[in-house]
Image (cartoon, grey):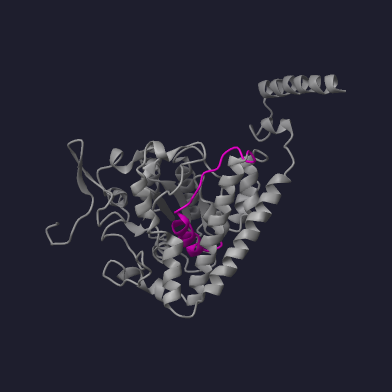
Amino acid sequence: MSDNGVARAFDFEVEGVKHHETTVGSPYYDGGPVAVRFIDKDGNRIRNEVNLPYDKYVDALTEEDGRRLYRDMALVRRLDTEGTALQRQGELGLWPGLLGQEAAQIGVGRAMKPQDHAFPAYREHGVAWCKDVDPLSIMSMYRGCTHAAWDPEEKKFHLYTIVIGNNALHAVGYAMGVQRDGDYGTGDPERDTAVVTFFGDGATAQGDIMESFVFAAVNQAPIVFYCQNNQWAISEPNVRQTRNPLYERASGFGFPGVRVDGNDVLACYAVSQHALEHARSGQGPFLIEAYTYRMGAHTTSDDPTKYRDSAEVELWRERDPLTRLKKFLLSLHETEEAFFEEVDREADELAAAIRAGVQQMPDPPSSMLWDHTYVDPHGPLAEQRAEFEEYQAGFETQES
């Protein structure tokens, strides 16, 4: 208990060292009483002091808005499931899944305005969906057909970044550019711009993240740092990385931080709206820790059964973001089962279209290996390219 009598989560012993996180079975395992949450795992609406600054954003939503959010999550889940299946069948080289993190991504994605820029890591398929990036564009990248098949400036969704935490530095630099262009704090809702950068709990151990916090804070850059804390940095749990909740790190750099229930799409939407308004209006950076769970593997090259307890997975299955919102919508008595059946049919159609599109993708030319490597001509690279093309031509001669 804290001094004021409010239960504090996060305290337990690991190998004799006191950490501040949660354990399986703990009542705080879903983020604790500090997490902003509007719907519990049983679909019940919650009102409390923690939610108070964000209530207005949820109260402004209609039941139709709730159905749209559910549809987004359901279609993105089906997209993700198809991506995993295609990789397992040899159609994709790799696939990083987002199963369990749909609410965390759709909530912030739908809170963003068209002019807001997203700098993703590599599993932000839900944010890409909200930014109207064609799912086949993402699939083509993981199939090795393109470097990236969308225009970052057009979509305001930048390229996937495999280097952990590196995209946060890119995002801060872009936000500083927005600042210098005067595209924030004007009061014009169609001009004021924020930047959102995405990373996981594991990335917070990278120097890139801390450096981006420093630059953003001292420049008061219009950026939202969005950490999807899915509990596992590949095979390492949070207790191996941090002694305090991640959202508390923001205060050390001089800007606000909030923990939100990452499996509650309404909460993610509301907190993101607040944080984005904070950034766009010129008040500086904001950190959101979306406390969620990665239900599947880190990527399709990972086997989580080697390091994770199945009981933990089942505990989080009870907190499924789609089930939670479905229960809430049904309790409002205007949404019927027919709506969910129609969404399921639409999801199946999306999956079929994705599968057909991936299988019809032409193989890229081998010369693509040398494209977009250097801006200016590069002698050694040109020599390597010529040598490779001569080598390839030798096979064509043998076949003929």
Q: Position of residue 148 (x, y in %)?
A: 63, 44
Which range of residues does the magenta coloring cover?
90-114
Quick check: can you spot residue 280? no
- In which quadrant is the C terminus drawn? top right
Task: Tell me if residue 301 comes above or below residue 230 in the rendering.
Answer: above
Q: Nearer the viewer, residue 390 or 207?
A: 390
Q: Residue at x 35, y 72 (%)?
A: 45
Q: Residue at x 52, y 73 (%)?
A: 337
Task: Tell me if residue 144 comes above or below residue 39 in the rendering.
Answer: above
Left or right of residue 75, residue 321 in this image: left
Question: Is 108 in the magenta?
Answer: yes
Determine the main secondary structure of the stretch shown in magenta. loop
Left or right of residue 353, residue 286 in this image: left
- In which quadrant is the N terminus drawn? bottom left
Q: Position of residue 32 (x, y in %)?
A: 27, 58
Q: Position of residue 378 (x, y in %)?
A: 67, 26
Q: Nearer the viewer, residue 260 or 295?
A: 295
Question: Is 34 in the magenta?
Answer: no
Q: Residue furthest left?
A: 3
Left or right of residue 11, residue 245 in this image: right
Q: Position of residue 90 (x, y in %)?
A: 63, 38
